[in-house]
Image (cartoon, rainbow, N blue to C red):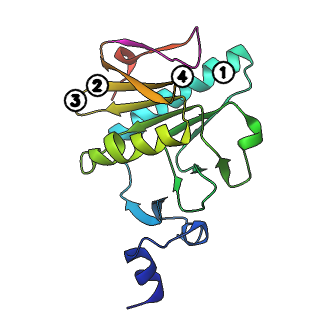
Amino acid sequence: MSLAYAKIKENNCTEEDYYRIPENVHGELIEGQIYYQAAPSRIHQEISGFLYTTIYNYIKEKQGACRVYHAPFAVKLFCDKKTIVEPDLSVVCDQNKLTDQGCDGAPDWIIEIISPNNPGNDYVRKLNLYADAGVREYWIVDPMGKTVSVYHLEENTFRAAEFTFEDTVQAYIYDDFSIDFSEVIW
């Protein structure tokens, strides 16, 4: 057994192991375990592009300080060097968190678009990670069910709301911004 395989099997991977993943391989480091991911589907990319463009245009129009990034974009949630995720979309309002490698600390808003092969990753594992890290707002977009689950942090607990692709969804981190999911085209 190789040393690299032994480290992965024992959840001993660190930030250094994460940055050794080849650029053409998509993976995340969660609590010392590397999780490899398949390339996203076309529908996933259509939704991601729509959301990125909508958020980017809003921030640009308002001349806001926040920045929006799409995957792959490394987000080191904690100082322990054992958790680096690559959310589909990250909105970072504190530019002191931005580094050449990505973001050190919790983004203000994260959006994940679930894949049919591993929805529990976003609904359970990442939901808990993002709450523990202090992400202010977390959306889970489900292309198959055409739903949007919105979680916003209130007093260290995520509050949840459910929407469909027929709804306009208000962003909690902005008072005057919402996304009309009926405009998603694929």
> Looking at the image, which residue is at 75% across and 18% down?
63
What's the residue type where badge 2 is placed? Answer: Thr
> How far apart are the two marked residues, 3 and 1, measured between alpha carbons?
29 Å
Few, some or many residues within 10 Å of mark 4 (<14, 14–19, 20+): some
Q: Are marks 4 and 1 in contact (CB under 8 Å)?
A: no
SS at mark 4 in the image: helix
Q: Which residue is labeled 2 in the image? A: 147
Task: State the image quarter where residue 186 is shown.
Answer: top left
Which residue is outermost to the bottom?
Answer: 1
Viewer-side residue, 136 vs 48: 136
Q: Which residue shows up at 43% across the image and 70% down it?
A: 11
Q: Is residue 99 visible?
A: yes
Label 4 amino acid? Thr
Q: Is residue 113 above or below residue 76?
A: above
Res. 114 visible in picture: no
Q: In the rendered structure, find residue 145 and report the number of the disc placed on it.
A: 3
- Calculate the distance from the C-alpha at mark 3 to the C-alpha at mark 2: 5 Å
Q: Are marks 3 and 2 in contact (CB under 8 Å)?
A: yes
Q: Which residue position holds label 1?
A: 59
Position of residue 18 relative to residue 1, above or below, is above
Residue 54 is tagged as: 4
Looking at the image, the residue that sits furthest to the right is 96
Q: Residue at x 61, y 26 (%)?
A: 56
Magenta extent: 167-176
Determine whether the residue tagged by mark 2 lies in a helix, strand or loop: strand
- Nearer the viewer's eye, disc 3 or disc 4? 3
Which mark sits nearer the N-terminus, 4 or 1?
A: 4
In reply to whether residue 138 is colored magenta, the answer given is: no
